[in-house]
Structures are given as structure tokens and as C-alpha cells.
Image (cartoon, helix red, strand yellow):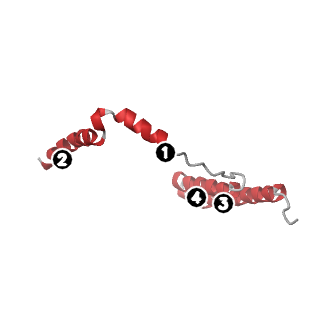
């Protein structure tokens, strides 16, 4: 019985809030004017190329974790070691590429 009362109260509650929140039942126009009045926040630039080594390591970690869950017990250790080694190799390659393509700013 208390569950039924809670469900009935929760079904009536949004309607009561809506009537109090928007004057004269103009919810759509009130919300659109609030969004038009608010200034947009500029999005920062994300350098995904600089984050590539960490993202490769994160992907290798997920790959090793999936292997630990899906593979039989006798193959898990070898697969995890291989996934970790390939992840570190990929991250090292990306780090070298970033180092080569970064301009020299010592001047």
C-alpha cells in the first residue's frame, strides 16, 4: 500500500511543479527565452594528438581487461602481457611522433 501511494504522489508531482514554474502555461516560450538570453561558453581546444599516447594505453588496458574476462584461465596471462606490451609500444611510437612534429621553441 505505501508503494502505491508513493507512485501516485510521484505521478501527480511533476504536474504540480509545472503549473507553478511557468506563468500562464507558457513553458515552451519561457524556456526558449531563457536559453536565448544566456551567453554561450566557448569550448576549449583539445589537442587529441598530444593525448594520443595516454589514449593508446587506455585502449590497451581495456583490451587486456576484456581478454581477462573472456579468455580461458590458461590464456589470460599471456594475452595480458601481449596486450600490455603492444600498448606500451604504441604509446612509445606516438610519443616519438609527437616529439618529432613539435616545433623547437627554444629561440
Left or right: residue 44 versus residue 69 is right
Q: Picture quarter containing residue 68?
A: bottom right
Q: CA distance from mark 2 to mark 4?
A: 49 Å
- Look at mark 3 in the image and give the residue it sits on: 84
Between discs 1 and 2, the one toward the N terminus: 2
Q: Which mark, by number, is residue 38?
A: 1
**Comparing marks 2 and 3, which lies closer to the viewer?**
2
Where residue 1 appears, as percent x and y from the top left, is 11, 47
Between discs 2 and 3, the one toward the N terminus: 2
Q: CA distance from mark 2 to mark 3?
A: 51 Å
**Comparing marks 1 and 2, which lies closer to the viewer?**
1
Where residue 6 appears, as percent x and y from the top left, is 18, 47
Q: CA distance from mark 1 to mark 3?
A: 47 Å
Q: Residues within 10 Å of mark 3 (few under 14, many from 20)?
A: some
- Look at mark 4 in the image and give the residue it sits on: 76
2 and 3 marks in contact (CB < 8 Å): no
- Look at mark 2 in the image and give the residue it sits on: 6
Amino acid at each position: 500500500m505505501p508503494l502505491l501511494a508513493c507512485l501516485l504522489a510521484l505521478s501527480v508531482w511533476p504536474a504540480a511543479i509545472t503549473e507553478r514554474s511557468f506563468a500562464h502555461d507558457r513553458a515552451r516560450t519561457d524556456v526558449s527565452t531563457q536559453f536565448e538570453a544566456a551567453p554561450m561558453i566557448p569550448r576549449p581546444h583539445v589537442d587529441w594528438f598530444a593525448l594520443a599516447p595516454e589514449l593508446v594505453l587506455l585502449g590497451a588496458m581495456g583490451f587486456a581487461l576484456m581478454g581477462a574476462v573472456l579468455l580461458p584461465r590458461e590464456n589470460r596471462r599471456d594475452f595480458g602481457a601481449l596486450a600490455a606490451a603492444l600498448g606500451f609500444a604504441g604509446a612509445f611510437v606516438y610519443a616519438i611522433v609527437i616529439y618529432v612534429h613539435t616545433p623547437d621553441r627554444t629561440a
